[in-house]
Amino acid sequence: MNGKRILSIATAGFLLLPTLAFASGCGEEKPIRLRVYSWEEYIDEGGEDSYVYDEIDGMIHDDYKAWNLQTFGSEVDESAPSLLNDFERWYEHKYGTPITVEYSTFGTNEDMYNQLKLGDTYDLICPSEYMIMKLAAENMLVPYPESFFDQENEDNHYARNVSPFIDNVFTSHTVTVTDESGNQTDHLWRDYAAGYMWGTTGMIYNPETADEDDLINWNVMLNKSYQNEVTTKDNVRDSYFVGLAILYEEELLSLRSLHESGNLSDEEYTNKIAEIMNRTDEQSVQGVQEILLSMKDNLYGFETDTGKSDLVKGIISLNFAWSGDAVYAIDLAEEEDVILKYFVPQECANLWFDGWVMPKDENRTEETVQAAHAFVNFLSMPYNAIRNMYYIGYTSAIASDEVLEYIDYMYGIEEGDEGVPYDLSYFFGYDAEIVTYEDQLSRQLFAQYPPEDVMLRCSVMDYFDTETYERINELWAQVKGAELDAWAIAVICVSIVAITAFFLLIKFGNKIDFFRTKPKKGYVKVKQEPYRKDVL
Amino acid sequence: MKRLRFSRKTLGIPYAVFLLFFVVIPMLVIVFYAFTDQENHFSVMNFAKFFSDPTKLSTIVYSLVIALITTVCCLVIAYPVALILARSKMKKKSVILMLFVTPMWINFVLRVNAIRELLNWIGLLGEANYFNTILGMVYDFLPFMILPLYNTLVKIDNSLYEASADLGGNAFTTFTRVTLPLSMPGIMSGITMVFLPSMTNYVVSDMLGNSKITIIGKFIETYFGSDWHMGSMIALILLIVVFTSTMLTGGFQSEENVRGANL
């Protein structure tokens, strides 16, 4: 046997090593694998920005430490681990089984949907409301069992702590599920989703450059005095919503005055707004397209995440925003000594939320299902909800005394200061009022927990079915695409053909010399004779 | 015992597998998606829709124009630089060449962000979206033009210039009769490397044109959010445009005279 041969066998053996290691690993107790798929930066990732880290500095209070000891059976971990690590620690402490969370992230609901369609499997995902409806309607989700909502069970933190307001949204809306055999059944949203974060849409503005008298309606986006100073989101749903609000402004405002004069009940008002903001008929789509096209001329641009920093830098003065982003932007601006504010236009706003759902997977074990429910419940523990809120700036669906205390800690007045009362009873389900500074009525507190009258005009925007989605996406393509006149296209096409011809000439017309005027036959053209002089 | 031997054929297998899985099959998938509808039935509707919609046509023509302007600007800027560097007797010319190429080592998004800040500082951001986009593209693709040009120019034998002078050619004649024709492979290679990516590089148009400028790459991305079939059709049409222009600029020539033109 020669040396080379030995070498190749050794190499092969080396390559096989991981397989062997895998085989031998099977003997030990395997931890449960929980595959979680959520938004980027949408959970407390620990470290210096974490609540736990700040808590150690004595920023908040001792209750957290007591709770931590009780829950984890150990002191607060000073290294401020991520909430995922804490979940693994908690799960093993509580149930005695090791667990590993495989956490992956997505950037848009559509990306997530495509991944699922391509066959990726997860145990828990966290899409937005319309995507939850779409997944449910396509029978891709596993419902939560009735026992998950049993408030008697002390481990059901979600059922015990979820805000009655959110629970009401989840139990007052239904989605029609079509199963494999074509049967259609109506299900409550609550059957499929457990709320995580929620919020509204509105606009952040810089009060120094934007006149608050102009900031009443969505049509400020078309206001010429803010030309090149407004941005909106570079996505079809948010833009379509704004377009609808501008298109049906009159109707929405007349509903508002009817409601104010007492001729329309709260519920009717909310429902009527929801009806308008879900119109997708041909006429509405056409109208929205025209509005968005004229809006495009007025806008500074479409953005996905540059809007916040552009606002802080003073490049723009108005920016369409989700409430959680608004909180983040206002905080960010404060560090730069810029004051930003948030408002929700008078007509309506979008009520959005993200929730935990379980996609179907035939190979999932009962153990994993339990662990997934435990994960949702773990995130719904008030202090964990606070940790997430503190870290990402969005508003948790969880309402409890601890959360109220946290809001008061964040936005309440210092002793001796003057303040205004701020009522949050609708969210907590009991008399909940804090006293806050007046400027918070248009800043972080307002963005994070809008008052009840704002919530009345917030509506959920349903998912578009395939046919509608195609039409609305086509609208978006028309809005975003280039607009050239027919003559311009013609001129450009002709010039492109000309250039093509030119290249063809160079390639195949070797005989044609562009740079030489051929001398007559028998003559040689001599231009210069510099060397002759030297020779002579 | 037979000795383990690799023939040229066996050594080629990994590459063939690579090409099959990462080039041929994906292309077939694109073709499949382009000519099917939502129910996966054969359909030429996407094709018809593309050519009957002025917006889509405008967008592709528009991208062509932006790419064309970018390429011409790159060529005009890069040629003198490459020529000076190649012909100069500077000892440290490789350092200067390096300086032109160094930005390529810095993350692309970072560079575009830096330009964004710069444009904002000058006050052009949001005011001149088209100019900004083209500026960003030219800045970004300039090294891809300089390098092939420099490589071809530096390889032109000095004796050719002497011969030209011997035969009575002045500087201009030498340039048009010797330098330019001999650097043609470099020019073509540079054009291919700049023209094609500048039709699809929508990060630049998004960041510097505030997403108000939609080039064909962005369009494809938008469609892939909802309608993979239309998205694939646009991608296929773009592929054909790219293929044609590569053929025209001689990118598929395998003759030896394409010297040093490839990066």
Image: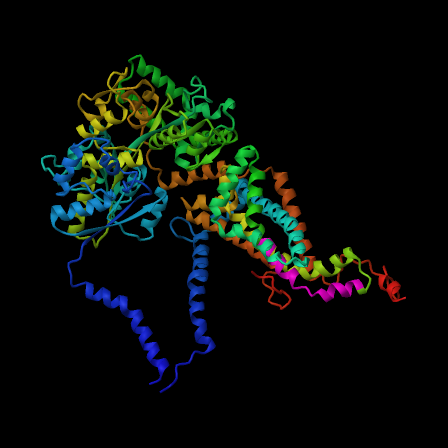
Question: Does B92 sit left or right of B33 as displayed?
Answer: right
Would you say residue A326 is visible in this rendering?
A: yes
Residue that lies at the very extreme toward the top in this rendered image: A261
Tell me residue A251's x, y (percent). Answer: 39, 20
A262 relative to A77, above or below: above
Figure quadrant of the C terminus of chain A: bottom right
Q: Is residue B144 left or right of residue A337?
A: right
Was residue B163 drawn as part of the magenta stretch in this picture?
yes
Q: Is residue A35 above or below residue A511?
A: above
Report the predominant secondary structure element of the magenta stretch. Answer: helix
Residue B127 forms part of the magenta stretch = no
Q: Nearer the viewer, residue B125 or B96?
A: B96
Question: Residue A22: x and y, percent?
Answer: 23, 64
- Asked if residue A454 is positioned above or below residue A104 in the image, the reply reads above
- For the N terminus of chain A, the image quarter is bottom left
Q: Could you say which is closer to the camera, residue A489 or residue A211?
A: A211
Q: Nearer the viewer, residue A195 or B87?
A: B87
Q: Position of residue B152 (x, y in %)?
A: 64, 61
> What percent of the width, then of the height, locates residue B95?
58, 55
Q: Quadrant of residue B222?
A: top left
Render colour scheme: rainbow
Which residue is rendered at x = 43% and y = 49% of the image?
B229
* Magenta residue span: B144-165
